[in-house]
Amino acid sequence: MGLFTIALFAFLAAVYLIGESPEGELRLSFVRKARWASAATVLAGGVVFVSAHLDGLELIPQFLRSKTAMGCLLLATLSLPLLWLALRNAQIWRARMLAGMQVILILAGWMWLQFPVLVHMPQGDLTFFNAHAPERTLVNLAWALIVGGAFILPALFYLFRVFKRDEE
């Protein structure tokens, strides 16, 4: 699963960096890296299924029993040619949207398959229902996020404005 995660993040980074790089050789380099990372992600995804089978976890039958998880996996797979076409034609925003959609579909399918379990453990599974912090901690966290966001978000927007300003 770690190799798959690394390949997936490399794929996302390459796709998103295409639009951030100037026209020319650097951009073409990121397009090539995005293609290779896409292929590596598909291959690593296959390795996840094989290694799960070798470890005694029948992941393929679990996916086949869940129409939603299988649908997510199929949609992510069927969108690959569209992504590759967008990369070839330098359609940056379409490639970004398709890459993001693929990752969301992969995560949604996996989440649907595993819900409510977060981590399988011998002494008992960690689930959404037994993993939360005490209510007072969650309230304090919510307030900290609101106050922190009030400081961080304006600074983030300022940074985007400064660094994304068109050259005059």
Image (cartoon, rainbow, N blue to C red):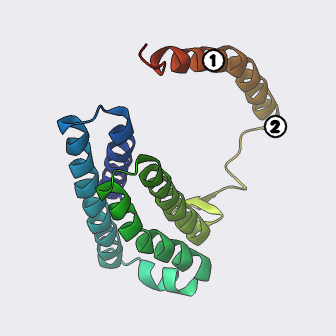
Corner quadrant of residue 69? bottom right
Q: Is residue 2 found left or right of 121 in the rendered image?
A: left
Corner quadrant of residue 27? top left
**Where is 66 relative to 104, above or below?**
below
Relative depth, front residue between 165 and 65: 165
- Residue 116 position in % (x across, y down): 66, 64
Q: Is residue 136 found left or right of 23 in the rendered image?
A: right
- Residue 127 position in % (x across, y down): 64, 58
| Amino acid residing under circle 1 | Ile
- Residue at (71% x, 45% y) in the render: 132
- Residue 166 position in % (x across, y down): 46, 20
Residue 58 visible in rendering: no
- Residue at (58% x, 14% y) in the render: 158
Which element carries disc 1, helix, strand or loop? helix
The residue labelled by disc 1 is 152
Relative depth, front residue between 10 and 136: 10
Relative depth, front residue between 130 and 58: 58
Quadrant holding the N terminus: bottom left
Residue 129 visible in rendering: yes
Mark 2 nearby-residue class (10 Å; few <14, some 14–19, many ≥20): few
State how far apart marks 1 and 2 are (Cα): 25 Å
**Where is 61 relative to 33, above or below?**
below
- Residue 148 position in % (x across, y down): 68, 18
| Amino acid residing under circle 2 | Glu
The residue labelled by disc 2 is 135
Mark 1 nearby-residue class (10 Å; few <14, some 14–19, many ≥20): few
